[in-house]
Image (spheres, grey):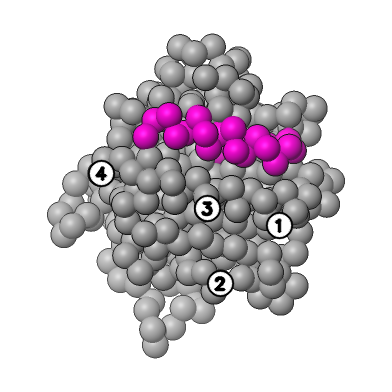
Amino acid sequence: MLTVYSTAHRLHHATELKDGVLKPCFEMPSRADTIRARVQAVGLGDVIAPRAFDPSRYARVHSERYVRFLEQAWGEWRELGREHDALPLIWPVRDLRSDIEPAHIDGKLGFYAMDAGVAITAGTWEAVRTSADLALTGMAVLEAGERSAFALCRPPGHHAAAEYMGGYCYLNNAAIAAQAGLDGGARRVAVLDIDFHHGNGTQSIFYACDDVLFVSLHGDPKQSYPYFLGHRDETGAGAGLGFNHNYPLAHGTDWNGYGAALADACRRVAAHAPDVLVVSLGVDTFKGDPISHFRLESEDFLRIGATIAGIGCPTLFVMEGGYMVDDIGVNAVNVLCGFEGRS
């Protein structure tokens, strides 16, 4: 299996407001580097660099003004003499207006953010655009005839919606890749999200679409981030009604519960008969993950990969979460090895 990787991710290492304290993000550069080292250690396959794509490709799922904001935000922040990380100050909640983009950077940061886990630094734009290019390159690899590929994206993307960032995510890499699949001629695409946290951004982007099936297994939003999407009754809208399926699972879920839910989710995906499958690969379902609450073992990730392989269509894995850095390489690559029938 080809892996698409770039060192540009190291340009982004931000702070976040977590548990009432400003601290370095759990989403750190060593995550991607640890996975890459494991890819090479097990001989998974060649590691290639991404192609560069025009930002108009990101605007196939995001708004043009949002992409422009991400590109320009650090410059606007720095013009005010600020050299520290840019974080939101105010959000347009409830009865505040959310239809007019503010002119001031402090307003823009809140306008385009859902939380305080998406600081912007001097290197953020280059890192996030390259992360999206990894996913686009992975889809291009499938279009060229490969049956599978791994986009080692960082920062992750599945919490980013058409016009907001959040949960360490800025551009939605999986959604950008899925749309690229449609643009490249696929009639039907499926996105299977197996991160512990619900892929609210991906759901939002495709919620009214009938050519992209979105299926997510995740911690119950009554107890887990992102709290405000991911319930079982969210099944799509308009033409997309019936094309969105959520599997919210309780804290402490182990393989017995998770494996059964995954098998059912994969049956749904297979019934959709996608021309291509995009997997939002989060391994924060691992026991002991510092910000998640499932109890999967490392060998369970081999089972996950084997179950997904049973769907039987070209598959792009797009890296999302996983914050137990010492184990992230083993767990992420176990999914890929399980998919390929390797132990």
Residue at 68 percent across and 64 percent down: it is: 243
User: Label 3, on which residue?
Assistant: 261
Q: Secondary structure at mark 2?
A: loop
Category of crowding for the residue at label 3, using alpha-carbon neighbours closer than 10 angstroms: few (below 14), some (14–19), many (at least 20): some
User: Label 1, on which residue?
Assistant: 212
Residue at 74 percent across and 38 percent down: it is: 313
User: Label 2, on which residue?
Assistant: 234
Q: Position of residue 199 (x, y in %)?
A: 50, 56
Task: Depth check: give the residue in front, 41 or 247.
Answer: 247
Where does the magenta region start and end? Answer: 297-318
Q: Is residue 254 visible?
A: yes
- 50 within the magenta span: no
Mark 3–mark 4 Cα distance, whole angstroms, equals 23 Å
User: Label 4, on which residue?
Assistant: 290
Looking at the rendered image, the disc whose residue lies closer to the viewer, 1 or 2, is 2
Mark 1–mark 2 Cα distance, whole angstroms, equals 15 Å
Category of crowding for the residue at label 4, using alpha-carbon neighbours closer than 10 angstroms: few (below 14), some (14–19), many (at least 20): few
User: What quarter of the picture does the N terminus occupy?
Assistant: top right
Task: Depth check: give the residue in front, 316 or 182.
Answer: 316
Quadrant hosting residue 283: top left
Image-based side of 176 in relation to 224, left or right? right
Category of crowding for the residue at label 2, using alpha-carbon neighbours closer than 10 angstroms: few (below 14), some (14–19), many (at least 20): some
Q: Position of residue 174 (x, y in %)?
A: 59, 46
- 311 within the magenta span: yes
Identify which amino acid the numbered label 4 is placed on: Pro
Looking at the rendered image, the disc whose residue lies closer to the viewer, 3 or 1, is 3
